[in-house]
Image: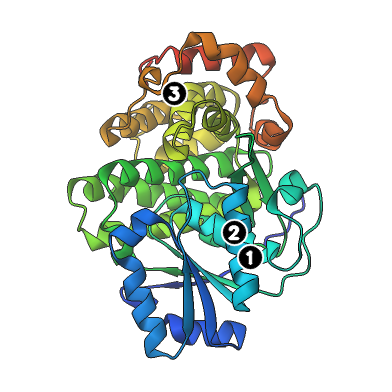
Amino acid sequence: MSNSFEFMPKTQIAFGIDRSLQIGTDVKRISGQNKVVLITDPGVMKVGLPDIILKALENDGVETVVFSNVQSDPTAASIDEAAELIRQFGAKCVIGLGGGSAMDVAKMSSLVAGAELPAVHYALMARPFAPKTIKSIMIPTTSGTGAEVTSTVVFSTDEKRKVWGWDADMAPDLAILEPKFTVALPDFLTAATTLDALVHSIEACAGKRSNPFIEALSLQSIRLIAKHFEPALQNPANLEARGNLALAATLAGMAIEQGGTGIAHCLGHALGTLGRIHHGRAVSIALAATYAWNAEASTPIHAAIARALGVKEEGLPEEGLALAGAKEFNRLVEQSGLKISLHDDGLSLVDTERLVEIALSEENAPMRLNNCRVATKEELEGFASKILAAAPVNA
């Protein structure tokens, strides 16, 4: 082993049924204050999960204001609005309750609130954030993005350009994994977010920045998803399955925090910019189109991924095992019920050139270049055509 590396988890993780009821104690311990801003989204508000957190905070004497103007594709304007609320309320702690969008708004607004510049000024690391003074606690309600343990956020500018923000201090101080909070997820979101976590794990351990710690996190995440994804789809109230998927998503988040993502996220983010395609669905479609191509060039790790997915070796050579992993991934996408065709989203082969242009843009370069196999423009055109033509995932 010739490559040197460092690995440093930044976020405390707490897991358990009803662990979220200790949130008031957590806020006071982490921030030294009894005030907090709770950031969530309308969908989470509708199912009543904030009420549980608000009651727990009230019981511990923590004064709370709620911000819920969060879209599924968070905007710079939403981050700025939340940051201004944090400043006005004088809170030294923010709670993000929801999926990746709510958590990203919570994470970035807690840093933006420390200065006067708007969120867009920090896009693509154009400027450093002010030193962190506001703590953050994340409570995910999906098992997908891993945003509860990462230092990166994704948001859209006023021009609908999908960009990212990063800071070493952006990783939350505490992540609370509450299995009950994912039970109310609609089937589509259970499918899309879990597959997002699976793509995270596959890309992190296959990527250029991988190391033994990232592989360990990723492969265990893949094993948990392979075992518990379909049971959760079949019985949404299955807390054992939900809890294990929550663990898998956080493991995957820890993996991409250190290892990054790859071509599926490059193309997936491009699809998000081009057609506002849900992130989990977009990266699943993109990996279905590129998995076998990756496996051909990076066989040993893709063979290990196939084993973690539950593929039986049965005398297969390593190359065959790696490619069998692609078939198993595609089977999971089919079983999830996610729609592969983008025609109803208004996209078709006429959008190929634009999709490739976005994939090659500055904001998507880190993902493209971290992939185990760097695609040429011509190869990207082939993948884009396959995605936009809605080729079957078992092709």
- Position of 365 compared to 48: left or right? right
For this rendering, which residue is in front, 307 or 341? 341
Q: Is residue 271 above or below residue 66?
A: above
From the top left corner, tell me how far across and down residue 270 is, in percent: 58, 29
The image quarter containing residue 265 is: top right
For this rendering, which residue is in front, 304 or 50? 50
- Position of 167 compared to 63: left or right? right
Mark 2 and mark 1: Cα distance apart in space: 5 Å
Mark 1 and mark 3: Cα distance apart in space: 55 Å
* Quadrant placement of the C terminus: top left
> Badge 3 is on which residue?
320
- Residue type at the position of mark 2: Glu
Q: Residues within 10 Å of mark 2 (few under 14, many from 20)?
A: some
- Residue type at the position of mark 3: Gly
In the picture as drawn, the residue positioned furthest to the right comes out as 127
For this rendering, which residue is in front, 183 or 321? 183
> Badge 1 is on which residue?
84
Helix or strand or loop: what does disc 3 sit on? helix
> Do the residues bearing badges 2 and 1 touch, measured as CB atoms within 8 Å?
yes
Q: Which mark is residue 81?
A: 2
Sequence-first tag of 1 and 3: 1
- Position of 232 compared to 292: left or right? left
For this rendering, which residue is in front, 100 or 50? 50
From the top left corner, tell me how far across and down residue 72 is, in percent: 45, 45
Q: Residues within 10 Å of mark 3 (few under 14, many from 20)?
A: some
